[in-house]
Image (tube, grey):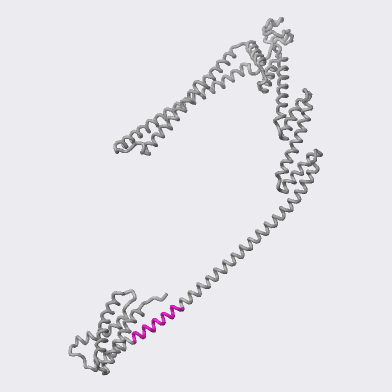
Amino acid sequence: MAIIKCSVCDKDIEVLDDSIDVICKSCGTGQFPYTLPDNLTDKYILNYISKLDMKISDCERASDRLQSDIQRYTAEELQIKIKSTEALSRQLSSGERYSDDSQYTDYQNSIAEISRKIRDTESQIQRLEHGDRVNLLVEKTFWEGILAYSPAKRLSDFYYTMLDFKNRITSSTKLQDIIDLARQFNSIKDYKDSKSLAMECAKMAVSKRYDLLVSNMSKFSTKKEFDALAEEFLSLKGYKDSDNLFRECIDRAIKAEYDQLMSDMGRADTAVAFSNLADRFRGMGTYRDSKEQINICEERAVILYKEEKAREEQRILDEAEKERQRLIEIEREKDRKYQEHLRVQKEMKLAAYVRRKRRRFHLIGRFISIVIGIISIAIFLILTIVSGGSEDSSADVFLNVLHILPLLVLSFSSIHSKVQRILFTIIGGIWTIFLLVTSFASNTSDIAAILFKIISICNIICYVASFIFPKDKEFR
């Protein structure tokens, strides 16, 4: 039996444990003797129904968006089908196989992709309208029905719903669900036997938690896991053998740390790693052979430090040697380039010297050839004057021109004027050969015949010189 205050006259009212409604004997006012939990108040239910309405609206808006997407996909599919039909018609009219048309194939692939999008969108709409939205409407209807109940009806249904759930608890029931059930019973602890039921659920939760912790002991293997498990057993201090299991977890955590250190020790290969291992072994205190392992780690750290220092020094020396070799190679390259420069300069000077020599030889040869040509012309003129000339003056002019040809060839023929040189040489050469043949054919040995032979030889020298020593020959 419990005692409450009247909300009108503030008098004490005696309430039996199974009472739902009581009446104040002083003022006759009906009273509800219990406090509803938060999740059964009108305010909570109205707020929750409002949230459900928002979710239903979101589903409807999402469904409308998906319907718009289907319309857009359908329009795109229709356009692509029209283009695909046109492409197929062009193929058939040209007599080609449509399967070979890459454009038609692309259209078909696009149609298949859009059809897939339409099917997926329709599935989403189906899930929204006949799944999520229906479930939300059902839940909303349920809570609206709860809202119509009286506080006594709500409390009674809430109590018997939790009691039914408690009676169906098995070993597979989640620990959190049992804890939540204990809290819910505790929220109506003044109603009937809810307080004792809350205690029972709490005990079931503790037992469930204890069993889970015991089962985890065989699954865990690291220090971190055993430390966390030890904290859990510590929170259950005094329950069954939690104290012993707490100490066992501490021992297993130390052992796991020791095993991990030994494993890390087998993989360590640097001085820093062994130094860190020594510090971690110091944290183990006197456990097993931790002090010996500290000495081993410190010795290995010293040895590896010396080796690493030697390798670092050797690396620095190697890098210095590489740098020295690089600088030597740079100096060699500079020297090679300098020698190459000197060689090029020497070759250029030698080439210039050879050009000067060749040009000098060319000028001398050309000068001598011109002198010989002039001598040939002078001798011919002397012979013409001495002999009194020919009766035909035009013939004399022609003969004089033929004798001047060698000099003209030497003076005016260019190395690039091949036609000019060939023309002069053919005309003059024919005349020279004629003179040479006639002079050697005559058996006379007078001075005129000898001079004609000299003239012919001089002319031949001039024509040959015109090719050997052209006017504008370049020297490279």
Residue 248, percent across and down?
77, 30
Q: Is residue 375 above or below residue 289?
A: below
Q: Nearer the viewer, residue 449 or 468?
A: 449
Magenta-colored span: 353-371
Q: Place residue 244 in its image quadrant.
A: top right
Q: Nearer the viewer, residue 297 or 26?
A: 297
Q: How many marks?
A: 0
Q: Place residue 435 in its image quadrant.
A: bottom left
Q: Place residue 176 in its image quadrant.
A: top right
Q: Is residue 289 above or below residue 203?
A: below
Q: Nearer the viewer, residue 143 or 85?
A: 85
Magenta stretch encompasses residue 247: no
Residue 114, percent across and down?
43, 31
Left or right: residue 405 versus residue 38 is left
Q: Residue at x 48, y 23 (%)?
A: 126
Which residue is outermost to the right? 286
Residue 396, percent across and down?
21, 87
Residue 156, percent across and down?
65, 11
Q: Residue at x 33, y 74 (%)?
A: 416
Q: Main secondary structure of the magenta part?
A: helix
Magenta stretch encompasses residue 356: yes
Q: Quadrant of the N terminus?
A: top right
Left or right: residue 73 versus residue 199 is left
Q: Nearer the viewer, residue 169 or 401?
A: 169
Q: Residue at x 30, y 83 (%)?
A: 406
Q: Quadrant of the C terminus?
A: bottom left
